[in-house]
Image (cartoon, rainbow, N blue to C red):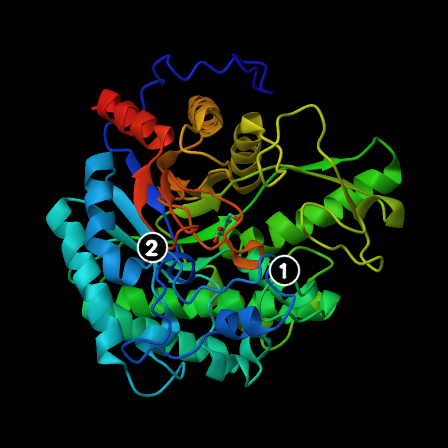
Amino acid sequence: MTTLPSGRPADPSAPLPRFPANFLWGVSTSATQIEGAVREDGRGPSSWDAFAAEPGRIKDGSDASVAADHYHRYPEDVALLKDLGVGGYRFSVSWSRVLPEGAGPVNKAGLDFYDRLVDALCEAGVRPVPTLFHWDTPLALEERGGWLERDIAYRFAEYVDVVAERLGDRVGRWITLNEPAELTMLGHALGDHAPGRRLLFDAVPVAHHQLLAHGLAVDVLRSRGSGSIGIANSHGPTWAASDSEADRGAADFYDLLLNQLFADPLLLGRYPEGIAEMLPGPVEEDLRLISQPLDWYGVNYYQPTRVGAPDPAVSAHFAGIRIPPEMPFSLHPVEGYPHTAFDWPVVPSGLTELLVAFRDRYGDSLPPVVITENGCSYEGIDDQDRIAYLDGHLRALHDAMEAGVDVRGYFVWSLMDNWEWAQGYAQRFGLVHVDFADGSLTRTPKASYGWLRDALRAQK
Ligand code: IFM
C-alpha cells in the first residue's frame, strides 16, 4: 500500500466519504487536445496549429491535426461518458471552428459539430459544460497581436454570443476561460506554449485582456439568460524553499503571479499590489466588469510549487518549464512525495490547503467552488497509481468541505489520453487509453475508469 503524503495510507478499495447528493461529478477535455479534424468543415487555423508547425516546439515533433479524432468519434466518447456515470462533461469550443478568422463570418458546419455533441450529451443524460476558450486563439487574431491587444476581448465577446445563441437552449453551465495564468506565463512570458512569445513581465497585459474578455463574456451570457457561469483558474499552494527572508519573499511573489493576479480581480475587484502599474487601459472601469458575481469558481489543482530566491543553479529547467535567470524566483523540487510520469509531485493535502486558504482570503466573496480539473499523467492501462491519486485527492477535497469550504463539483482531467500541448502525445492523463502508437486511436478504458465508475455508483 502506498503512503500518500497527507500522512494517510491510500487504500482505494475503501469507500470514499459521502459527497452531497447534488454534487456534480464530471470529466474534462479540450478541443485542441482531442478533436483533430483541424482542416475539416471550414475550421480556421489556431495559434497552436502554427506553434506546432515550428520545428522544435513540441517535444515529440507531433501536432494536433488528428489527436484523438473526437470530431468524428464523439458518439463513442459520449457512450464512454454515459457508462462512466458522470453527471457533467467539460469540453471546450474551438473559436476558430466557429469563426475561422476569429471574427466575421460564422462557420455553420463548425457550430453544427457542437450542436450535435450537445444533443448527444443531453440524450445520454450528461450535462454539457462548455469552456469557451482553452488557449487556442484563432491565428488571424494572433497575427494581429492576439491577447496583447485589448481588441481581442471584444472579438471574444462576439464569438461567445454566437455560441450562446446556438447552444444556450441546452447548455445550463458555462466556463468562460481555461487557465488564463498559463496562457500568460507559458505562452507569453516564457514562450514554452503558443504563441511562443518570451516577453517576461511585458506579458502582464495578456492577463488583463483575458480577464476583460471574461467580464464581457459574463455580460453576454447573462443577456442570453444564463444563470450558471464560472471560470477555470489554475491554482496551487506556494511553499517557500526555506525560511530565509529571500525565499519567503520569492514565494510570496510567485503566489501573487499564480494565484492572486487571477483571483483578486475576479473576487475582490482589484489587482494585487505590485501588478497594477504594469496593466494597460482603463483598469478601474474594466475591474467593474471583471468582478461581476460568478455563480461558481472553478479551480484546476495539480500540485504545490516550492519557490526560492533567484538561483541559476536550481531552476534553469524545471518540470519541462524553462525559468530564465531574469525572473525574481527559482523553482525547486518538491521532495518527499511520489511523482507522476510528468514528474509532478502528488500532494493531495495541497488541495485542502489551497481551498482553505482561498476561503480564508476571499471569505464571502468566494462563490461555491467546483474543481474543474484534477488528474495525473501515468503510463499503462492497469493504472493503479492514477487510482491512488484520485482517491487521495477526493479525500483531501472532502477534508476541505468538512473544514467549511463550499465545493459543488469535481471534474477529472481527463476523459481520455490526448495531445498534451508542448509535450505532444508523451503524457497520458486519460481514464481511457487511446492507441496513438498504431494510429487506430482505439479507446480502452483503464483500471481508473472502472474504479471511478464504481465510486460514483457507490455515491448514489
Ligand atoms: O492538459 C492540460 C489542460 O489543457 C490544462 N490544465 C492542465 C492539463 C495538464 O497539463
What is the x, y in percent for residue 213? 46, 70
Question: What residue is drawn where x is 34% and y is 14%?
Answer: 15
In the displayed structure, 438 sits above or below 46; it is: above
**Which residue has dot 2 on it?**
91
The furthest residue to the front: 438
Image quadrant holding the C terminus, namely top left
Judge left or right: residue 254 versus residue 8. Answer: right
The three-letter code of the residue at mark 2 reads Phe
Comparing 440 with 46, the one in front is 440
Comparing 46 with 380, the one in front is 380
Q: Secondary structure at mark 1?
A: helix
What is the x, y in percent for residue 39? 36, 76
Question: What residue is drawn where x is 24% and y is 72%?
Answer: 111
What is the x, y in percent for residue 238? 68, 39
Q: In terms of sequence position, does the residue under pointer 1 or pointer 2 come before the other? A: 2
Instruction: Decide if residue 80 is in sight here.
Output: yes
Q: Which mark is residue 186?
A: 1
